[in-house]
Amino acid sequence: MHPLSSDQRWNNLKAGVNGVDSRFKLCGTKRKAEGSFHTGTPTFLENPFCAHDNVHAHTNVKETNFGQDLSMSPFYDQCYSSVLDNPASSPSNLLKLSNNPFGQRKMQRTLSMPQTTVGDNSLLDGVDVTIRRVNSTNSFPKLRFRDHVWTYTQRYLAAEAIEDAILETGPTKHEGNVDGMHLVQLLISCAEAVACRDKAHASNLLVELRANALVFGSSFQRVASCFMQALTDRIALVKPLGAVGLVTPAPNLNSIGSEKKEEALRLVYEVCPHIQFGHFVANLTILEAFEGEKFVHVVDLGMTLGLPHGRQWRSLLESLANHHGQSLRRIRITAVGPCVNRFHIIGDELEAYAHELGINLEFSHVESSLETLKPEDIKTYENEVLVVNSILQLHCVVKESRGALNSVLKIIHELSPKVLVLVEQDSSHNGPFFLGRFMEALYYYSAIFDALDAMLPKYDTRRAKVEQFYFAEEIKNIVSCEGPSRVERHERLDQWRRRMSRAGFQAAPVKLVAQAKQWLAELKVCEGYTIVEEKGSLVLGWKSKPIVAASCWKC
């Protein structure tokens, strides 16, 4: 009934990178000093990029090592039966494969290391592995594209072995999980085919994905439908084998109307706490910076993607009227971005609202993208306290050369703001390799769609609009676009720390974790969202998966 034998499935599990499921970590016992069977992952498989080319003949397997009978091992029954006895598994567990390899391990360069030889009784039974280390730091292997394809192929084989084991003994009640794992395999296989420019194989897999990835299905089926659309767009732009690069995308490829985008942004603000979290942390930080000041100025980069009615600044004006009304004489807000007409409307509404609160507000805008912004575009006055606000904006100017981002940060540094508030998605979607970005994005957006599933019913139109008109557009940009057209270049918080430090900024710890947790409890969104403090920054997450990070910086 199943093409893979029990031995082959176990061998596939052994070949997995960083393990497949957390249950396997509890299967075996601690390895003895010598001669015991090791159920963990070999070092050269844990991080194949570090020693992949230095392994003698890659593995130097004696005869046909992967066909040997592992059932003779005293640990075989214990390890393999644990999967069969507890087949409950989910796509989210398999997706955790991709969360470790990217940026978690770094190669440690040393001046001199002795030659190390691993014999027959070491990591893999029957495998003779010799790793030679030399003095030169230039001896590390050059990463090749086939190395990355090899890595993800191992993950796919490991996931396939898990599914085969569940299919063999799993009861009917786990069919939904099996379908989810099958979608994971289809998506990874299709992404590998696209990365290898195999349009025929990718097209066949997309046909099967369209039949299984339902827009109104389970949470993972819904996110799979977004990635299926993105892969469809990318395969249409892929050149044949032997060519270089992608075909120039057609203008407005599957574009969403501006009205639908604006409505989707409004719904994201109302339904999800992501943007509201950024506004809450930013406003508390700005209020602290404005304490006791008479003339204050806020430079807002992007105006929160042009969110209607200036939601963030309405809340700030209310707080200023309640706590700083007597000392404050004038507040200026400068919006930076190309949405001039929208900024006009927001500015008029804010000025009218500030007048009702008895606050003197001057609103202005700079019609410029962040990449073309110039220092003289922003007018500043003496004796005026300046703060800069950036909500989900700076990742759009992160390019391969980093010149655009460095230019923007330089301009901000020249303004000498009292504080810069930076709120960004906390995920690695700017890697140089397509497969890496794909796996990171799949894991990240699966968590977001899981949160939406907990907050809204399956057939709620608001949920469909948020998924298809907002998050699906981000997924398409990450997966299907390259070069200047790829603007959703999200990076992890640690990477932003390095970038800001190189630009001359110093971290200002955000000591608002207690207030933020209280705010989240009062928001009453749903259980599952968490707020933690990480190295002076606040991170909003869903079931321990980071979603959005807020940090503050000073010159």
Image (cartoon, rainbow, N blue to C red):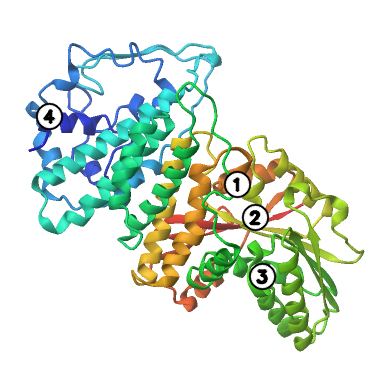
Give the amino acid type for the residue marked by disc 1 in the picture.
Answer: Pro
Residue 1: image tag: none
Q: Residue at x 80, y 82 (%)?
A: 359
Give the amino acid type for the residue marked by disc 3 in the picture.
Answer: Asn
Q: Position of residue 83 (x, y in %)?
A: 15, 44
Q: Residue at x 66, y 65 (%)?
A: 306
Comes first in the chain, label 4 or label 1 = 4
Q: Residues within 10 Å of mark 2 (few under 14, many from 20)?
A: many
Q: Is residue 57 above or below residue 323?
A: above
Is label 2 in a helix, a strand or a loop? loop
Residue 251: image tag: 1
> Which residue occupies the foreground of this view, 343 or 117?
343
Q: Position of residue 57 (x, y in %)?
A: 33, 11
Circle 4 or circle 1, nearest the eye: 1
Location of mark 4 (residue) = 7
Q: Residue at x 46, y 27 (%)?
A: 240
Distance, label 4 to label 1, CA atoms, is 52 Å
- Seen in the image, is 474 located left or right of residue 283? left
Comes first in the chain, label 1 or label 3 = 1
Circle 2 or circle 1, nearest the eye: 1
User: Which quarter of the picture shows residue 191?
Assistant: top left
- Seen in the image, is 231 located left or right of residue 321? left
Comes first in the chain, label 2 or label 1 = 1
Location of mark 2 (residue) = 393
Q: Residues within 10 Å of mark 1 (few under 14, many from 20)?
A: few
- Seen in the image, is 340 located left or right of residue 142? right
Distance, label 3 to label 2, CA atoms, is 17 Å
Circle 4 or circle 2, nearest the eye: 2
Is label 3 in a helix, a strand or a loop? helix
